[in-house]
Amino acid sequence: MKRVVITGMGIYSCIGKNLQEVKESLYNGTSGIVYDEKRKDFGFRSCFTGQVAPPELKKLLSRRERVSMGEEAQYAYVSTLEALEQAKVSQDYLNKNEVGILFGNDSTAKSVIESIDVIREKKDTTLVGSGAIFKAMNSTVTMNLSTIFKLTGVNFTISAACASGSHAIGMGYQLIKAGMQEMVICGGAQELNMLAVASFDGLGVFATDQTDAAKASRPFDKDRNGLIPSGGAATLILESYESAIERGATILGEIVGYGFSSNGEHISTPNVEGPSRAMRKALDQASIKPEQIDYVNAHATSTPVGDANEAKAIFEVFGPKGPHVSSTKSMTGHECWMAGASEVVYSMLMMQHSFVAPNINLENPDEDSEKLNLVKKTLDKKIDVFLSNSFGFGGTNSALVIKKLQ
Amino acid sequence: MDKTEIIEKIHYFLVDEFEVEEDDLTPEAHLKETLELDSLDFVDLVVAVESSFSVKLVGDDFKGVVLLQDFYDLIERKIS
């Protein structure tokens, strides 16, 4: 079995458009949440959202390339450019080597709705234009990026709700570990518009208190009242240890465990057993004891039941003297399909720069979260190994264990 | 609409939307080789023509349309 390392990262999120900006926001506990008035008029119950500016791609990509890209693919292109640059992977390298791509994505709502609206109005399918189909398919990110970067390895999209990005990294890890690929571009992307999350808002799981955008996402706090939708994209360059050494790449971290499970229960309500089983599997695979984990990046989205059950699961796995825990969703909101990848980037930045980002807005832990070693204020601390949780609708769970290269 | 106006409108969307170089827009320009329009771009030409001239083209309309001059002629025929 091959060792799998991370040699590049890129991020485009509501707390920063690149690694440097995001690192600063994480350290300073800066929220990326805003109030979107348009949502109120549209019929939303909760109008808070993460916000990112659309990237300017006209100078970077041809028209032919751009017309096939919806916003999730655009975000992913930008984060992938940054990741490839950090990994020192050139287009020439991509042309000469079989590099794959696996991204997590689970919707293209805006592209689908807008194109169907055109057809309804014009009563002619051709008038929707040539890019509509490529924007509307769920594999839009991998389809576009594999074409733009001329990739010749594995090429597909993982749809696993809010664990999509994490499973994409996990699958990339497995393929490299098994010797089937030397390098895979992994990540997660999430469209950020009200059409994508309107029906999600309808479930009543978004933050009900609409008084203060920056304070609305409060994972683990007893007064939490729902999640805040968000989005963007995150990319990680995974490769075999041998490949990284041969290229002379800087190794940022090593993936040592990927645990997955399914709850086998309710479609939207998470349980305790599934997540704890995923965490245990990741730790077992990594041959790492729970007490060796320095930091857990929790999935916690700021919903009453989800956070409570994750707190129970973390306590069950790590016990009373567990690792430091925080949910970066307190700053970013819930980046959904992207979250599993972005939160690995956030945790990697913490490991690189020796700090734990705060779980902002955590004023009063509830009875489950008070048993955890939650980080309310930025903590300067060396991290050697961390675990990142991601869970999704349908009861899909993923836990990744990543450590500094020894 | 006279021929000059038709050509102006075609040139406008070819430059503005299809990002074709203005200097390449001669009647002898080959749509595929000179202007580098591919099969998917022809779908978008249908959209641009509908938007600019309120005329709906179908795939068969492009039979024999090789040069930009052929395209001018096609539009002129369709709107007459």
Image (cartoon, helix red, strand yellow):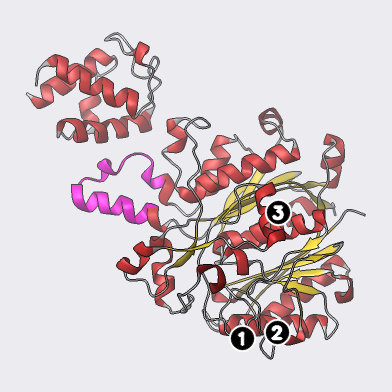
Across and down, in percent, residue A333 comes to 56, 66
Give the residue drawn at x 31%, y 34%.
B44
Other residues around mark 2 within 10 Å, as few (<14) / some (14–19) / many (≥20): many
Q: Which residues are magenta?
A: A111-133
Closer to the N terminus: mark 1 or mark 3? 3
Residue contact between numbered discs 2 and 1, judged by CB atoms under 8 Å: yes
Label 1, residues with CA under 10 Å away: few <14, some 14-19, many ≥20: many
Residues marked 1 and 3 touching at CB (< 8 Å): no
On the picture, is B49 further left or further right than A250? left
Give the position of the C terminus of chain A as an image quadrant.
bottom right
Q: Are marks 2 and 1 on the same chain?
A: yes
- A364 or A324, which is in the foreground? A364
Residue labelled with disc 3 = A23
> Of the residues tagged 3 and 2, which is closer to the observer?
3
Instruction: Name the one closer to the observer, A17 or A183.
Output: A17
Q: Is residue A121 magenta?
A: yes
Image coordinates for residue B36, horizontal then vertical, percent: 41, 21
Q: For residue B26, what is the image quadrant? A: top left
Pointer 1 residue: A222
Label 1: which secondary element: loop
Labels 1 and 3 positioned on one and the same chain: yes
Q: Where A301 sits versus A79, above or below? A: below
Examine the residues drawn in magenta and state their main secondary structure: helix
Residue at which label 2 appears? A369
> Looking at numbered disc 3 in the image, what kind of residue is underneath it?
Lys
Chain ID of residue with mark 2? A
